[in-house]
Image: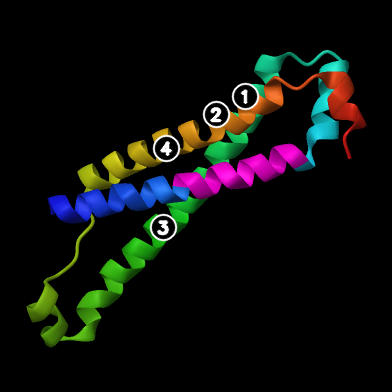
Amino acid sequence: NLFLGIIGVLTLVVGGIGVSNIMNVVVEERTPEIGVKMALGAKPRAVLGQFLLETLIVTAVGGVIGLGITLAICAVFPALGQEAIDFVGVPTVSPMVAGITATVLGLIGLIAGFFPARAAANLDPVVAMKMQ
């Protein structure tokens, strides 16, 4: 179980790297928009919060899809027959493990999104509006 837990955490970290890359692209694509917002008076904190919220939404959607797939596999697996159950056992979803996984996923998503969000919040409005 410990081995599978370590593999799961490492998978979440790799997913966090993917989320960070996605958010870097989002910041690059929306740099002029960020410049306009900041020129009109948006505080860096508001820009940071916006991108962190987007990151958490992307992470949450991925987590919900993953949980749905997990629940579907756990529901379908017993229907495969007694041979499969004898070989592996009956898979179950533990609420405690699901909660811990959701917490780790949220933390990884928050960390992965912080650096692109910070870069967006630190943009100079005049330079950001000129970029295209």
Residue 30 horizontal/vertical position (percent)? 79, 38
Residue 23 among those drawn in magenta: yes
Q: Nearer the viewer, mark 3 or mark 4?
A: 4
Label 3 Cα crowd, 10 Å radius (few <14 / some 14-19 / many 20+): few
User: Mark 4 Cα within 10 Å, few/some/many (few <14, many 20+)?
Assistant: many
Circles 1 and 2, Cβ within 8 Å, touching? The answer is: yes
- Earlier sequence position, callout 4 versus callout 1: 4
Q: Earlier in the sequence, mark 4 or mark 2?
A: 4
Which region of the structure is painted magenta? 16-28
- Residue at disc 4, secondary structure: helix
Disc 3 residue type (three-letter): Gly
**What is the CA distance from the residue labelled 1 to the residue labelled 3?**
28 Å
Q: Are marks 1 and 3 in contact (CB under 8 Å)?
A: no
Q: Earlier in the sequence, mark 3 or mark 4?
A: 3
Residue identified by numbered label 3: 66
Residue 85: image location, x then y, percent: 12, 78
Three-letter amino acid code at the position of disc 4? Ile
Nearest the camera: 66 or 129?
Answer: 129
Q: Return the residue found at the far right.
A: 130
